[in-house]
Amino acid sequence: MSSLVFLLSRKLKNRLREMLRRPSELIVLVVFVGLIGVTIFTGNRSLPSAGTRSVEEFYAIVLALYVFEFVLIAKNGFLNGASMFSMADVNLLFTSPKKPQILLTFGLFSQLGRSLMLGVFILYQYAWVHDTYGVGLGTIIAVLVGYGAVAFLSQMLAMLIYSVTSSDDKRCKIAKAVFYAVVASFLVCLGFTSFSSGGELLSNVCKNANSPVMHFFPVAGFVRLGVVSAVSGDYKGLLLAVLCFVLCVAVFYILVSRLKSDYYEDVLKATEVSFSAITARKEGKAAETAPRNVKVGKTGFSRGEGASAIAEKHKLENRRSKVLILDMVNLVFAVITIGFAFIVKDSFYAFIMNVYFSIFTVGTGRWAKELLLPYVYLIPEPPFKKLINMLREQLWSSVAEATLTFLPFYFILNTSPLMVLGMIFAKLSFNFLFVGVNLILQRFFGNGGNKALLVFLYFLLAALCSLPGVAAGVAMSALVPVFEGVLFFAMALVNILAGVIIIFCSRNILTTAEFNNK
């Protein structure tokens, strides 16, 4: 065991040395911590009237967050599983004469810190949460700890599911049906009790989401119970949640280590998939995730010639990879936005949240993967024409996403059709603007350099480029207050103009293949 302790301490020490030797990483860390400090400082300066909404709404939002996290992580067990080891750990540990149970314990301990770091973004929500619900910093920290606990248990469950189902497709289908049936049963119960009860729908949803029945939701339910109990001082509830957590860890641990005498093959598979994805991102290569069974259907292009063949290729790839018109990430963000709008009863705040999500999603389209492949550089067409055809897929997916997200506002918030149309146009303009920001960074920095610094520059440029549109929208809404949706239409016009200028400045990005792929 002393060798494992030495390995863990050496990894931490080397990580610290690497950070000190790379000033860019240190700068990003300082800025990261500074932004958290600013968020906490501004949140604590709220007026005494802060907390204008019921804290039950906040706890319902926490449960929804945990449920989404649990489902998204645990369902990986039906695909490639989840590994708690890195490839370096596999090379060092699996060749050692240690028992599998000891190595599994080491992997679980190493995963604790990574699981907690997944939810650091929660700290940035402190200002508006404190202002809206009146909760303190301790509550946000408790939610962060709960987020890490859900991630930890969900990854263990994914590892267990993969170990049980990876060798049998029939068993995989049965496990998947049971998994989604359990999740759906709780959601149907919540919806039925909320709609069947009299009174306001939002109050019913919040009341039923905090009912004892939802404490039995797998992982997310009892973790939320622990968070609420810790904040309210209910030590019995906290003790019950901790016991459930320990019991789940023990059960998952025993099943993974005993169900198969040797789980190394499953861990190696999951670790290899994870390592390949990480390596591809570091080296600036495209990593496409495909299902095990692909329905090919129609093959070849029925239309498209020259540069337009790129857009047709993207349509064909989307048809094969997406069950619906949008991918899972965009669907989840659309549901979160609609749910947030239903809770806060304010379309503007919901729009801001959705635009915030767009910063993370616009850079994951097929146009970004195309820059990492050699074929687009070999097409004998003008670079700018090829670039425009690469972005056509992003346009149609953005239209579908914006329509699916904001059209329900007309029904749940009684928003006027003109306002809904303005939000759709503004959403498209922000997506267009963020694509331009991605391109300009690719144009001048490529895929080389420090990734953390590039991410920081991306967020900084996205914020700066959004300021003119926001300022124009606020100014026009003050000048022409009688025109509904003028705020969104003005933002859309300025954002489109800025996006056109930025994309035009990146028009020669396809002439620097070696630079982009270094």
Image: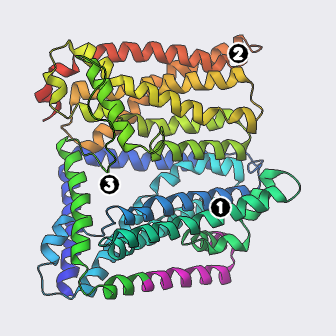
Question: Reading the chain from its start, which is encountered first: label 2 or label 1?
Answer: 1
Quadrant into which the C terminus falls: top left
Q: Which mark is residue 478?
A: 2
Percent of width and height locating residue 150 = 49, 68
Q: How many marks?
A: 3
Q: Which residue is mark 1?
A: 187
Quadrant into which the N terminus falls: bottom left
Of circles 2 and 1, the one toward us is 1
Nearest the viewer among 340 and 52 is: 340
Q: Residue at x 72, y 55 (%)?
A: 57
Of circles 3 and 2, the one toward us is 3
Q: Which residue is mark 3?
A: 293
Tell me which amino acid carries mark 1. Leu
Question: Reading the chain from its start, which is encountered first: label 3 or label 2?
Answer: 3
Q: Which residues are magenta?
A: 228-251
Tell me which amino acid carries mark 3. Asn
Percent of width and height locating residue 319 = 38, 38
Tell me which amino acid carries mark 2. Ala
Disc 2 from disc 1: Cα separation: 43 Å
Residue 231 within the magenta-colored segment of the rendering: yes
Q: Residues within 10 Å of mark 2 (few under 14, many from 20)?
A: few
